[in-house]
Amino acid sequence: MSTTTPRAGTTGTTRPTRTTLEESAMTTTARPGTETAYPPQIDAVGALPFSRLLRTELRKLIDTRAGRWLVVAILVITALSMGVTLWLNRETGTGMLGLMLAANIPQALLIPILGVMTAANEWGQRTALITFTQEPRRLRVMAAKTLAAVLLGLGVLLVTTLLAAAAHTVSVSAAGGGEVDAWLGWPLTVNLLVLQTIGVLMGVAFGALFLNVPVGIVAYFLVPMLSPLLFLTTAWLRENSAWLDMSVAQGALLGDEWATGEQWAQVGTTSALWILLPLAVGFWRVARREVK
Amino acid sequence: MIQIENLTRRYGGFTAVDDITFTARPGRVTGFLGPNGAGKSTAMRMMVGLTTPSSGTALVLGRPYRALPTPTRHVGAMLDATAQHAGRTGRETLNLAAVMAGRGRRDVDAALERVGLTSREAERRVGNYSLGMRQRLGLAGALIGDPQVLVLDEPANGLDPAGIRWMRGLLRDFAAEGGTVLLSSHLLHEVEQIAQDLVMIGRGRIVAQGTKEELLQAGGTLVRSPDLAGLGTALERDGHEVTLRAEGDLRTTATAEEVARLALAAQLLVTELRTAGGSGLEEMFLQLTAADARETGAEGVAA
């Protein structure tokens, strides 16, 4: 549909503007005759909905060559590592647990890179200049980025599970007909969901902390490698490393049994230290930083 | 409409933008002119909420930019044409802008057409674009929300003469339809061609502003006469300022008509009489740049 909308400050001229049904309806409901310091059209346009931000950020994750290839690489490497597991267990057939754990090794390394990229690459490519003029509420953008990365990470997990189910079916029938059981069980399902989410969030946190993709990735790789050294320095740290060392705490989730309450608490404290803290500092930086 | 009041931005002891006040009016193209490093970009970033002012206000359409709902529907900004993701295609860049503005695929096509990017060019990655193409793409992104206000930082940079002429037409049309255009440049003749109002800034401060005609008039009148001394005396007696120029003529604050009347009354021969026009503005601009004594400033004028 096409209507004619008068423009602000127009000196008697109007020009046809495409207007959506919704907007023209809103224009007519705008209080006529009320004197405002600004043209009424401003209120005829609604605020930017979060769904739009989320859509944009999801799209940005995979609309560049780097992003697309990262997702493809993750899936290919996942399939390869499952293939190795299938081959090693070709006599007996491979269960879902073994396949999912095989997939988890490369994914735990690569999935967080998605998070680093979404949080940091706008500062390297300087598209932050555009993004934050489109939505000046920067933390809203960061929330959308975080959610988008988590959703993509969980999407990858879903594809991984489907791959594993297919691999499991093939391997069982090739090994001479055992029972096909593609259900992961609740404990493993929950554990994998938590691990994947934590991994993505850690990437986002490190990306936001450094606002630089290479530095974020390097830091994300180095921190889990170097932090155990730190935890060896004193007896107290050694004894309590499960409360501080992320890889120790997450070890409890790498299985198909429920973690104990204490183990969950350790996942909580390590996540607070290695995810929430850098995430908070990073978001604070984004909110404050001058965009150039 | 863009209203800037006492806008200031300090970085430590350095004042990048120093208490500037001006208004960019609807229906007009306002040129924001100054040498490199004068504070134009910092001021423009403050207008669109990317930089927080140390003091003062910048209102766009009567509101702070950050208080606009879906700002790209009201204000189109292009602050740096090179700030595009090199790995995205031109079309995808616009698709993202369209989603954020709540616009559709047809608006992307329309914007591409409006800035003269072919669909084949739009499928190429921005990394392969020339600066001129990036300027066009950036302008398309600014236009996609069908805004009433355009804020453009050095939009003519990298455009060839035909491109500059095209942009002049586009911005003039935009303003003629009631839109507000604020564009910055470090090239005087470029702004002179496009803008109707001028704001000249140097080292963070506004040094001159007004309509182009006013500022051109401020350059004064140039007169040539066999009896320059006599003419000069006559003008000074009438209360006008007079400066003898090395070119062998004199510059005066009197209008051409006043000069002609005085010359007639004093029975003096006048061989040339014209308004100084752009040369006055240019001199002011060059002084501004020279006073800056900066490498970047000097390059800016030479470019």
Image (cartoon, helix red, strand yellow):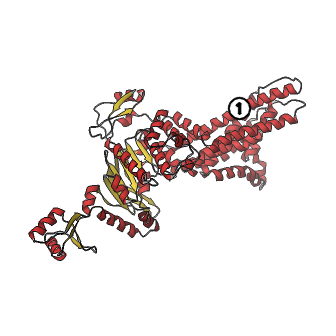
Q: Is residue A224 above or below residue A257?
A: below
Q: Name the residue: 87% across, 27% down.
A: A174
Q: Residue A183: x and y, percent? A: 77, 26
Of residues A4 and A159, the one nearer the viewer is A4
Q: Residue A83: x and y, percent? A: 81, 36
Secondary structure at numbered mark 1: helix
User: Can you say which quadrant of the picture contains the N terminus of chain A?
Assistant: top left
Residue A202 can be seen in this image: no
Of residues B126 and A256, the one nearer the viewer is B126
Tell whether B214 sits left or right of A76. Answer: left
Of residues B14 and A53, the one nearer the viewer is A53
Tell whether B276 sits left or right of A149. Answer: left
The residue that label 1 is drawn on is A159
Q: Name the residue: 50% across, 46% down.
A: A130
Q: Chain of mark 1?
A: A
Residue A191 can be seen in this image: yes
Q: Amino acid at mark 1?
A: Val
Tell whether B16 sits left or right of B96. Answer: left
Quarter of the view holding residue B232: bottom left
Q: Residue A222: x and y, percent? A: 72, 52
Q: Residues within 10 Å of mark 1 (few under 14, many from 20)?
A: few
